[in-house]
Image (tube, rainbow, N blue to C red):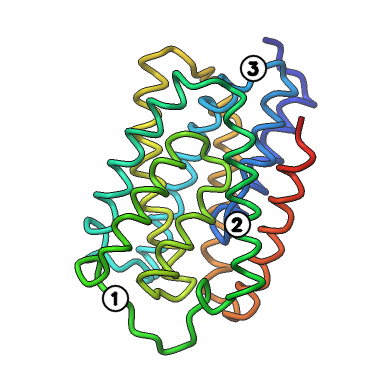
């Protein structure tokens, strides 16, 4: 595989935008997956290689949210366990399932999230002052986080929306803390997925690391934006990203 100025710039640029989008909402892989496939990668190899950028992006975001005291560390393990279990199931499914399954899953997730944002926006953006539940108080949250893990381990693209629905919808976290816990969950099951893809020799490391340099920069900037942003602005950004994600899923080949 050859690396020209164009392809390197494409990977870093799309990675930077994806890092911002994934940290504040979700769906950044709708940019990075096509960028990897432009380089000639099959969909399954692009899906695996994309996880390198996602993993390092989440490392950067988790560190940023924790430093800003927006990450509820006591809640990490209760939300991580079901998402990690789901991630293992999803990663193995991604390694052996037909490539034709990727688009229907992505499309269903994007359209579903868009409809939720239109019909019941308070489900995703709880009113200010709402006290969040613990996972032990909401068994439905365990199921939702497990499903999010399965989806994230399988396809990655759009998993941020599924996690936001699980964390804000069932546990009622505000969007900033939802995003912080979302990045931790994604970090966990992405690490598991990476292990599976490495075992199956499906990752191209050079483009993956080039992409990661952009995603980490974008994520670092997005954490600062999330902390300072008006909650209503975050909600509208999330809505716009769900619409864009739905359009991307519909128009993809």
Q: Are marks 3 and 2 in contact (CB under 8 Å)?
A: no
Q: Which residue is rendered at x = 75% and y = 43% of the image?
A: 250
Q: Going 66% across and 58% down the picture, which residue do you hit?
A: 242
Task: Work out which residue is located at the far bottom of the displayed protein and give it.
Answer: 129
Above or below, 114 relative to 90: below
Location of mark 2 (residue): 112
Rendered location of residue 45, percent (x, y):
56, 19
Q: Nearer the viewer, residue 89 or 68?
A: 89
Secondary structure found at label 1: loop
Residue depicted at x 32% and y 55%: 143
Q: Quadrant of the C terminus?
A: top right
Label 3 element class: loop
**Can you identify the residue that label 3 sits on?**
42
Q: Quadrant of the N terminus?
A: top right
Give the residue pinned by disc 1. 133
Density class for disc 1 (Cα within 10 Å; few <14, some 14-19, many ≥20) is: some
Q: CA distance from mark 3 to mark 2?
A: 27 Å
Q: Where is residue 44 drawn, in percent x and y? A: 56, 21
Disc with the residue nearer the chain's start (1 vs 2): 2
Q: CA distance from mark 1 to mark 2?
A: 24 Å
Q: Position of residue 204 (x, y in %)?
A: 54, 17
| Residue 85 against residue 141 in the figure, above or below | above
The nearer-to-camera label among 1 and 2 is 2
Point out the frontmost of discs 3 and 2.
Answer: 2
């Amino acid at each position: 595989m050859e690396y020209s100025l164009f392809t390197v710039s494409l990977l870093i640029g799309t990675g930077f935008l994806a890092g911002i989008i994934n940290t504040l909402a979700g769906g950044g892989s709708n940019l990075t997956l096509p960028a990897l496939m432009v380089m000639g990668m099959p969909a399954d190899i692009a899906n695996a290689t994309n996880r390198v950028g996602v993993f390092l992006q989440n490392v950067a975001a988790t560190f940023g949210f924790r430093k800003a005291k927006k990450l509820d560390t006591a809640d990490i393990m209760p939300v991580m366990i079901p998402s990690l279990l789901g991630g293992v199931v999803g990663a193995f499914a991604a390694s052996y399932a037909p490539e034709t399954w990727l688009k229907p899953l992505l499309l269903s997730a994007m359209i579903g999230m868009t409809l939720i944002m239109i019909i019941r926006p308070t489900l995703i953006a709880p009113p200010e002052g709402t006290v969040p539940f613990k996972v032990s108080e909401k068994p439905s949250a365990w199921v939702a986080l497990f499903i999010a893990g399965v989806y994230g381990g399988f396809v990655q693209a759009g998993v941020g929306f599924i996690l936001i629905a699980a964390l804000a919808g069932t546990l009622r976290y505000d969007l900033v803390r939802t995003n912080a816990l979302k990045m931790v969950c994604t970090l966990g099951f992405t690490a598991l997925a990476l292990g599976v893809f490495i075992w199956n020799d499906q990752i191209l490391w050079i483009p993956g690391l080039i992409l990661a340099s952009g995603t980490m920069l974008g994520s670092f900037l997005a954490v600062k934006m999330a902390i300072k942003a008006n909650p209503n602005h975050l909600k509208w950004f999330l809505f716009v990203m769900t619409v864009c994600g739905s359009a991307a899923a519909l128009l993809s080949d």
